[in-house]
Image (spheres, grey):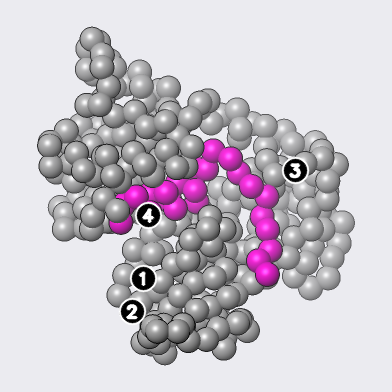
């Protein structure tokens, strides 16, 4: 069977006792797909689903793709908005994963392009070669889609700069409605997802403090390396806190219950939100999104076998 997501040859077959195929692809990782979804046209770009399934598999999970819900799976990952962001994502991951400071990067673009949410191997190759033009990598050669690079002083400088401009620590500030109806979302969705990703979640309803609430909010956001904003309930404070974090250059993960999708303010609809149906669903989607965009411990890219 061919992989439905990238089109390459893959191992696949029916799962015993289920109407589903188990797929094993060197590029997309392992995932499950229903026959209906396999034999139908995908509802979102295949490379986005490849990035999502690869991310999940690299973190020990196997995603199931059905005809419905593909947009939500694709929302687990975020595509870089411009070439410089794409290059920074690559440089950060590559240099943070080095065991030796003179270690070569041997990169199979055909297998690794989903890690950085590139459209295909050619686009990843373009990013890598533009990174070399900027002096962040030294091209040593290669064959086909496999290229070899050496780290450079400029690359190390850029990687150090990216690391130093990210707020220190593992605190994640959570902006959300303090209504009792959201307690389950916090306790069984957001909090365990962030803890699993290595973050220490800070939500002021759960914290004991005697400070002015507005001063406390801004101080805790400044101390955080990530903000999770849940817009369920459409509270103005959540919009303010997300905007304040963006102004400081702190990454924001956007969430909302799916039934309130159409209520979101038009200014923020352009951001890729996690739309969830219940706390358990949010727990998995949030963990995957954090691992895709702001992991605390970045691992070097690996080929799947």
Marks 3 & 4, CB-CB < 8 Å contact: no
Assess whether residue 154 is covered by the magenta stretch: no
- Residue for badge 2: 67
Residue 218 in picture, x, y percent from top left: 32, 21
Residue 285 circle label: 4
Quick check: can you spot residue 239? no
Q: CA distance from mark 2 to mark 4?
A: 18 Å
First-in-chain label (2 vs 4): 2
Marks 2 & 4, CB-CB < 8 Å contact: no
Q: Secondary structure at mark 4?
A: helix
Residue 70 circle label: 1
Closer to us: 217 or 271: 217
- Residue for badge 3: 98
Q: Secondary structure at mark 2?
A: loop
**Foreground: disc 4 or disc 1:** 4
Q: Secondary structure at mark 3?
A: loop
- Label 4 Cα neighbours within 10 Å, binned few <14 / some 14-19 / many ≥20: many
Residues drawn in magenta: 281-305
Q: With respect to residue 194, does 139 lie above or below?
A: below
- Label 1 Cα neighbours within 10 Å, binned few <14 / some 14-19 / many ≥20: some
Residue 207 circle label: none
> Which of the 4 image quarters holds residue 304?
bottom right
Marks 1 & 2, CB-CB < 8 Å contact: yes
- Residue sitting at the far front: 17
Q: Is residue 168 left or right of residue 123?
A: left
């Amino acid at each position: 069977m061919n992989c439905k997501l990238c089109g390459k040859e893959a191992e696949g077959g029916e799962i015993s006792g289920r109407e589903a195929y188990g797929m094993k692809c060197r590029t997309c990782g392992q995932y499950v797909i229903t026959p209906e979804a396999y034999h139908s046209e995908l509802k979102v770009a295949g490379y986005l689903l490849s990035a999502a399934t690869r991310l999940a598999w690299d973190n020990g999970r196997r995603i199931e793709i059905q005809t419905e819900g593909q947009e939500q799976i694709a929302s687990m990952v975020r595509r870089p908005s411009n070439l410089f962001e794409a290059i920074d994502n690559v440089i950060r991951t590559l240099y943070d994963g080095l065991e030796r400071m003179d270690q070569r990067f041997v990169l199979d673009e055909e297998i690794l392009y989903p890690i950085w949410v590139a459209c295909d191997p050619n686009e990843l190759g373009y990013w890598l070669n533009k990174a070399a033009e900027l002096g962040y990598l030294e091209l040593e050669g290669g064959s086909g889609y496999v290229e070899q690079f050496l780290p450079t002083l400029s690359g190390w400088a850029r990687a150090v700069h990216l690391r130093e401009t990210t707020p220190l620590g593992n605190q994640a500030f959570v902006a959300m409605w303090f209504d009792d109806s959201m307690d389950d979302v916090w306790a069984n969705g957001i909090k365990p997802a962030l803890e699993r990703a290595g973050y220490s979640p800070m939500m002021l309803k759960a914290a004991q403090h005697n400070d002015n609430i507005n001063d406390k909010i801004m101080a805790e956001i400044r101390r955080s390396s990530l903000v999770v904003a849940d817009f369920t309930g459409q509270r103005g404070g959540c919009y303010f806190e997300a905007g304040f974090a963006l102004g400081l250059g702190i990454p924001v993960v956007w969430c909302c219950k799916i039934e309130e999708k159409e209520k979101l303010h038009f200014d923020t609809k352009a951001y890729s939100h996690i739309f969830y149906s219940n706390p358990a669903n949010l727990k998995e989607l949030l963990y995957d999104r954090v691992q895709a965009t702001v992991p605390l411990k970045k691992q070097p890219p690996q080929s799947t076998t």
